[in-house]
Amino acid sequence: MSDSYSETKTVGFFSQLKESIKGVLTGIVLVLIAFPMLFLNECNAVEEYKALEEGASSVISVSADKFDKNNDNKLIHSTAEAKVNDTVEDPQFKISAEGAVKLVRETEIYQWVEEKTEKTEKKTGGSSETTTEYNYKEKWVSAPVDSSNFKVKKKHGNSDGNFVESKTFTAKDVSFGAFKLGPSLIDKFSGGEDLKVGKEDAEKIEGDYKDLEIGNGGFYIGNDPGKPDNGDVRIKFKVIKAGTVSIIAKQDSAELVPFKTSNGRTVELLEAGKKTADEMFATAEAGVAMLTWILRFLGLFLMFSGFMLIFKPLVVVADVIPFIGSMLNAGTFVFSAALTLGLGLTTIAISWLIVRPLIGIPLCICSLGSIIGLVFLGIAATRKKKAAAPAAA
């Protein structure tokens, strides 16, 4: 079920100018946040790489079948079958899973959701007309939606009285050959498969959630799983089993725990199946690289957004004539992107220059080239304007 509603709002020139001037402060804050974010992200990446390099150079491969005291406090690598020695259970719904490292309860609730889209059209004189369309539809979501903030509240109220949160239950006693796994290693188990429940499972439940319906292999709170109503809840379960895993961790007596490197970082890796130490370190380094790039793009996006907000008042003034405003907006976009590239690369280069000079020096050259290119671009644009002025006269 879905429906929609739209409204049109006209904003005058002075109101837009006032809001854009307020946005300059926000833009400055975003730029100031971006610089340390980019710097610290690169420093963190270098420290993580150093920790992994130290771990790769000191790790030893051993058999997990027996405990060797000579390897105490060393970083070891081994492959064996992990075994769970206790039972994980969801006490609220009386579901248990023997031999599982984790039991995951996944809950969804049927709710009204508001989706908003905006389309702005510039008008001569500096005003703008914004049409906002609100679309409402009911769907399954992972948490209750607060409908009190909806633009159109009538007919779109949400009920969440029967909702129960998703939760993960984790085994505490997991062995790995002759070793016991520490809590942080147990948390690294991932994946999983569906655990279907039936009528016999529903009959065990007491209290507020007794007499549940069964739908699609899970519990259902509502009248008809085939025709959901607002506020209906469905609960499914997933189990993450042990099986054969490869581990790199510190041997602490008979327990495997995080290994602390000389720079204060920790090394503790777990992968499903049989993996060599080299393969596991390669995967870990790829994970560090991916996170570093994600944070780089985020930092650069914050910086770019900040510059666009700083230059926004100029665009608003130019919007008195929409065609000129659109041209200036495109110009500020290019200028902000070039400025972000130059300053962002400089910040990243300085970070590497401090911790890894051989990598930082080439990056500094690239960032300097970007800034010089930006300057020449500005000079060329200025000369072009000056050359065009007499002809226009």
Image: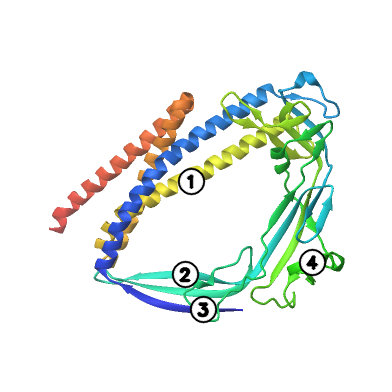
Cα gap from disc 2 to disc 3, whole angstroms = 11 Å
Q: Name the residue under label 4.
A: 206
Cα gap from disc 3 to disc 1, whole angstroms = 35 Å
Query: From this viewpoint, is residue 331 visible?
Result: no
Helix, strand or loop under label 4 = loop
Q: Name the disc covering residue 297, or none.
A: 1
Q: Which amino acid does label 3 sit on?
A: Ser
Cα gap from disc 1 to disc 2, whole angstroms = 25 Å
- The quadrant in which the C terminus is found is bottom left
> Which numbered mark, 3 or 1, is in the foreground of this view?
3
Q: Nearer the viewer, residue 169 or 246?
A: 169
Q: What residue type is labelled 1?
A: Phe
Residue 257, by quadrant, is: top right
Q: Earlier in the sequence, mark 4 or mark 3?
A: 3
Helix, strand or loop under label 1 = helix
> Which numbered mark, 4 or 3, is in the foreground of this view?
4
Q: Mark 3 points at which residue?
A: 4
